[in-house]
Image (spheres, grey):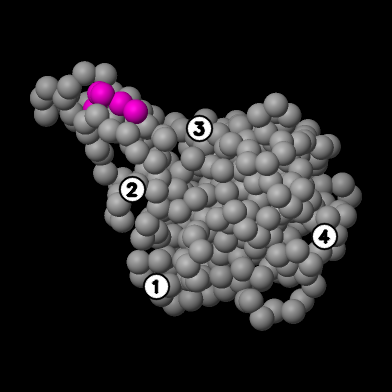
Amino acid sequence: MYIVASDPIAYRPAYEGDTRQMMYGSREFSPDSIAPGQRFVRPIFLRGAISSPFTFTFGLVALLLTGCAGSQGSDKTGAEASSSALEKGLVAHWCFDDSHQIGTDCSKGGYDGFVSGSERSIDGIVGQAAYFDGATWIDVPSPFFLDGLCEASVTAFFRVDELNNGAQILGGGDLRGGTDPLSFQLYGGRFTNVGFEDIPQGSSIKSDWDDETIRYAQDRWYHLAVTLSQQDDGSHLRVYLDGLLVEEVHETEKHCIGYDISMATQIGAIHGHQRWRGAIDELRVYHRPLSDTEISLLTAALPR
């Protein structure tokens, strides 16, 4: 269970412009019990009843300010990459440096993950990294993670121990086909299912599944960055490897991230499947598209 509350509770925006509804009253529920159309993120508990429109307005303003501040997280990717530019729009940052609580969100976003399986850390690119043995993943307590965003970035250092194991760096979805709002699946040296879906709209923007180009090998570190942006000519999905743009998908229609029901968000898996074998370090999520320069800054920690 995620919430037990007798006071009014409000849902903190995970990013600027988040329009999640507020819900009030004593309630206890798990993500599986959330009805379609409802939203769930980490709660803020508001003590006392809302006694007047002024009190409500003041509380709502404070809530929004808290949400904006929550997107400004700490940074552990080296001196250059700790610039204020790389803090802007940061929703979550899993640095994996705490060997006792590997899933800790190192930003102020509060998306601390919980390990399912064997918790283990190894030497990473920056400090420690999370090691995944093919039976382990990290659950993130937000079954609507990034819902409604039309611009976003996901970046991480990764190392695969088994090249032909189709696995997820970060996934959000369920067992129904074509219902993965978040998918960062790699397989056989290729980006096989990388991008975003808007389930209610029946649309997606993803890397080319049929691209047979081998882009990475096993037993060495790489940096992956994926950005979603909206421009005058439509939506753009850009995929970077070690700071270099390797794939761009352009769609004339607008593509966003959308859920129809609650779905688990996981690091190193998706709905408990496609489990990672290898390591992941410095996983970052933004509610904006990073620039080429910012992505280059993030890759600076890679051995040269």
Residue 36: which quarter of the image? Answer: bottom left
Kind of residue sitting beneath label 3: Gly
Task: State the residue at coordinates (56%, 43%).
Answer: 139
Would residue 294 be seen by someone viewing this image from the given angle?
Answer: no
User: Residue beneath label 3, please?
Assistant: 110
Closer to the observer: label 3 or label 4? 4
User: In the picture shown, does residue 191 fall above or below 36?
Assistant: below
Would residue 138 be seen by someone viewing this image from the given angle?
Answer: yes
Kind of residue sitting beneath label 1: Gly
The crowd level at tag 2 (other Cα within 10 Å; few <14, some 14-19, many 20+) is: some
Earlier in the chain: of badge 4 and badge 1, it is: 4
Earlier in the chain: of badge 1 and badge 3, it is: 3
> How far apart are the alpha carbons under marks 3 and 4?
32 Å
| Residue 202 disc label | 1
Task: State the residue at coordinates (39%, 41%).
Answer: 30
Residue 81: which quarter of the image? Answer: top right
> How far apart are the alpha carbons under marks 4 and 2?
37 Å
Task: State the residue at coordinates (26%, 19%).
Answer: 47
Kind of residue sitting beneath label 2: Ile
Which one is in front, 1 or 203?
Answer: 1
> For the magenta stretch, what is the residue range?
4-8
Left or right? Give the position of 229 relative to 210.
Answer: left
Closer to the observer: label 3 or label 2? 2
> How far apart are the alpha carbons under marks 2 and 1?
21 Å
Left or right? Give the position of 87 relative to 203.
Answer: right
Percent position of residue 217, x then y? 85, 63
User: Residue beneath label 4, please?
Assistant: 162
Task: State the residue at coordinates (18%, 28%).
Answer: 56
User: In the picture shown, does residue 162 fall above or below 191?
Assistant: above
Earlier in the chain: of badge 4 and badge 2, it is: 2
Closer to the observer: label 4 or label 1? 4
Secondary element at image label 4: loop
